[in-house]
Image: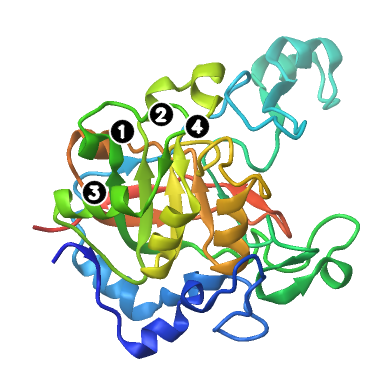
Amino acid sequence: MCGPMLIDAETRDKIAARNATFRQVSASPFGTDDEIGMLNLIDASSRRALISSTDAGKVFDLSTDYFVGMPSWAQGGDPAFNMWMTHTPTGTIVDDITGVGTEQNELVTYSGDAFSMYTHCGTHVDTLNHFGYHGEVWNNFKASEHLGSRHWNVGGADKHPPVLARGVLLDVPAMLGIDMLPPSYGIGEKDLADCLKRQEVELRPGDVALVRTGRMQAWPDPVAYMSNGPGLNREGAQFLAEAGAVTIGADTVGLEQGPSADEENWQVVHTYLLAEAGVPILEVANCEELSQEEIYEFAFFGACIRLRGATGSPMRPIAMPLKR
């Protein structure tokens, strides 16, 4: 069978997107304290089943490296990635900051560094407190009650669990017979349904859905990679969320079609997925090797840095083929 899996009533009730109200924050079907949304569909049995069907003989790294000058989201004036040395071998000898003396500093070659960046830089997750509506985020958590001086106390990256789930690649350019989608291309339901049909893949509740646009071929050129990105429109996002995806990602910096086709909402897909559907987002995922080897179903594993309260966090996701 190709396309979304037929869903039983019990599972359907757990898919927030199927009961969402347009432009309203959803209450979680997993309870008033829930902070991870659809990731609740991952449990011990689903992890065991996945591991038993995984071929760990080859690992696909879906992440990018971090470096000064890398493409990063800057539309809102957010800081770029920066890195600097805090200790160098020669500087340690000159400064003797450690106070151990010249002889030891000449013996011990000491290097150290530090970095700073926007939490939505490079391959990263968007957590459920990243976008919402009217001062609220997923599960009706209000900024007036849950946002302190430094960070949200709900829905942050520290609550985001390691994700071990079946992954599905939706290779839209391959389906259309091109290398890369044109700028600002909006990926809708038909594109995704045709992808699944071409690839002979079924989309199931609990899956991580990764959408390839081909834009990663422009990496790391900041202009070519960042400008007017192709991506999901709301219809496409709704198709994946209602199928029960627990995370939706793409190879672009913004996941969604840019600029927005919705004149009233510049982040129509982000607000829908995070606030209405309870689906975290993965961005800047390198899907090129999976596409080249035509691997459309795989075991997905990704764990982000547990930054307390953060709206995003770096992740190094990997994919491993399933046993045939």
* Quadrant showing the N terminus: bottom left
- Residue 183: image x %, image y %? 45, 27
Residue 288 numbered tag: 1
What's the residue at 72%, 59% (across, down)? 308
Structural crowding at the residue carrying mark 4, measured as other residues with C-alpha within 10 Å and reported as few (<14), some (14–19) or many (≥20): many
- CA separation in Å, label 1 and label 2: 7 Å
- Please tell me whether mark 4 or mark 1 is closer to you in this view: 4
Residue type of the residue flagged with mark 2:
Met
- Residue 307: image x %, image y %? 69, 54
Residue placed under numbered mark 2 in the picture: 216
| Residues marked 3 and 4 touching at CB (< 8 Å) | no
Residue placed under numbered mark 4 in the picture: 229
- CA separation in Å, label 3 and label 4: 19 Å
- CA separation in Å, label 3 and label 1: 16 Å
Residue type of the residue flagged with mark 1:
Glu
- CA separation in Å, label 3 and label 2: 19 Å
- Residue 227: image x %, image y %? 55, 24
Q: Is residue 202 left or right of residue 46?
A: left
